[in-house]
Image: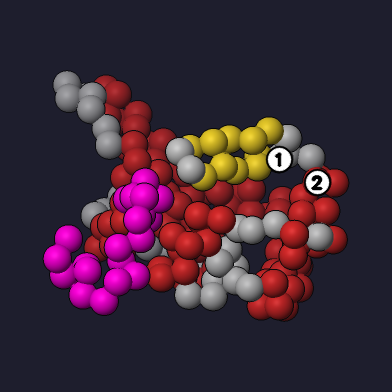
């Protein structure tokens, strides 16, 4: 593990499964989710990341089957399937005269397609056509990034969003 510092905030970065088990299950009350939970709470409510320990415990049990090996193998195949249109678009862009590609938008599009197929069994087709959902997701991500870089959480103040 290592500690990553950004201004007054610091983050613990881990990769060992035993450390994950310790932090997330055995001693979760000893660790704070930090700025990520603060940023995402207005966006996600009591979603999995900003959830309090009791809510998180219930939701963790609900999503546990999604980490079964057979399901994960299926999902890897689905990821490949959803990436085919992206690869075709990137190949076409590399062969065109204007080779400039907005990769963040492309990655958001393929992520939406993966989420659509895996969770809702719905093909958004956002890689092949412009999607208002992608624009909304992208704007939300930009707002989350802005909030993570802003030292004072002005968005919690009444009417502050209308002034900024």
Q: Which is nearer the eye, 131 or 129? A: 131
Q: Is residue 153 magenta?
A: yes
Q: Quadrant of the N terminus?
A: top right
Where does the image place residue 48, in percent across and percent down from the top left? Answer: 60, 68
For image coordinates 31% across by 45% down, the residue present is: 105
Secondary structure predominantly adopted by residues drawn in magenta = helix
Q: Is residue 13 magenta?
A: no
Tell me if 141 is positioned left or right of 97 in this view.
Answer: right
The image shows residue 18, relative to residue 95, as above or below, that is below
Q: Which is nearer the eye, 149 or 142? A: 149
CB-based contact (under 8 Å), mark 1 and mark 2: yes
Q: Which is nearer the eye, 63 or 109? A: 63
The image shows residue 27, relative to residue 54, as above or below, that is above
Where does the image place residue 97, in percent across and percent down from the top left? Answer: 17, 21
**First in sequence: mark 1 or mark 2?**
1
Residue 51 got which mark?
none
Q: Locate residue 132: give its quadrant.
A: bottom left
For image coordinates 77% across by 54% down, the residue present is: 23
For image coordinates 34% across by 41% down, the residue present is: 104
| Residue 82 showing in the rendered view | yes
Which residue is label 2 attached to? 19
Tell me if 140 is positioned left or right of 110 in this view.
Answer: left
Where does the image place residue 50, in percent across and percent down from the top left? Answer: 55, 67
The image shows residue 156, relative to residue 150, as above or below, that is below
Q: Which residues are magenta?
A: 144-164
Q: Which is nearer the eye, 129 or 105? A: 105
Q: Quadrant of the C terminus?
A: bottom left
Q: How many marks?
A: 2
Kindly state the secondary structure of the residue where label 2 is placed.
helix
Which residue is label 1 attached to? 14
Crowding around mark 2 (Cα neighbors within 10 Å: few <14, some 14 to 19, many 20+) is few
């Amino acid at each position: 593990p290592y500690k990553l510092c950004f201004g007054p905030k610091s983050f613990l970065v881990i990769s060992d499964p035993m450390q994950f088990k310790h932090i997330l299950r055995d001693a979760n009350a000893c660790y704070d989710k930090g700025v990520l939970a603060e940023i995402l709470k207005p966006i996600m409510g009591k979603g999995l990341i900003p959830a309090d320990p009791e809510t998180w415990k219930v939701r963790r049990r609900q999503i546990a089957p999604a980490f079964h090996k057979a399901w994960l193998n299926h999902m890897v195949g689905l990821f490949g399937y959803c990436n085919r249109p992206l690869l075709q678009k990137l190949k076409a862009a590399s062969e065109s005269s204007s080779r400039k590609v907005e990769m963040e938008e492309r990655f958001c599009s393929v992520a939406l397609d993966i989420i659509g197929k895996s969770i809702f069994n719905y093909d958004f087709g956002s890689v092949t056509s412009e999607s208002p959902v992608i624009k909304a997701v992208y704007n939300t991500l930009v707002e989350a990034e802005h909030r993570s870089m802003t030292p004072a959480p002005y968005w919690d103040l009444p009417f502050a969003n209308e002034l900024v």
